[in-house]
Image (tube, rainbow, N blue to C red):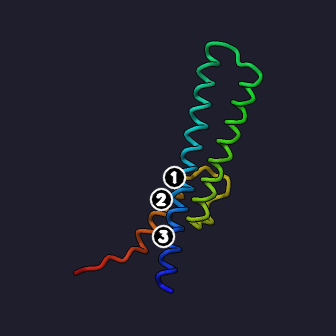
Amino acid sequence: MNKKIGALRKYLRGWASHTNGVYKQQKTTFQSTINNFDIVAKNRDLFEDERSQLDQARSDLTKLLREEELKFHQRAKVTDVLLGDNNTRYFQMVVNGKQRKKRILSRP
């Protein structure tokens, strides 16, 4: 039974890190797309399809950042900050502090 639980835990850790990696990759892709179109827009007017791609990248980036904020808000379990506040750094600090408190250090 312990081996099965250990294998499941190992699988889930890999799944979680893969999911976080996908978020980071998508975020980088959207940001680079937006930056490229902004550079092109300085030199000339954007075509209709380029403008729609830029709008789509901006909306996708906004959704992704909102999901990231909600994820950290849920992990922090903080109720004194209003939902919708852009305090992702605050939530990350709360989560990291909770993880430090839970850590048990063994002494030889």
Q: Residue at x 32, y 76 (%)?
A: 105
Q: On residue 45, which mark appears?
A: none
Distance from disc 3 to disc 2, alpha carbons, whole Å, reads: 26 Å
**Residue 53 sits above or below residue 66 on the image:** above
Q: Position of residue 64 (x, y in %)?
A: 64, 47
Residue tagged by mark 3? Answer: 10
1 versus 59 height, above or below: below
Q: CA distance from mark 2 to mark 1?
A: 6 Å
Report helix, strand or loop for mark 2: helix
Residue at (48, 70) in percent of width and height: 10
Q: Which residue type does callout 2 highlight?
A: Met
Q: Identify the residue under disc 2.
A: 93
Q: Local crowd at mark 2 within 10 Å, few (<14), some, or many (≥20)? A: few
Residue 69 place in picture, x, y as percent: 61, 53
Q: Identify which residue, 106 or 24, lies in the foreground.
A: 24
**Front position in the image: 49 or 65:** 49
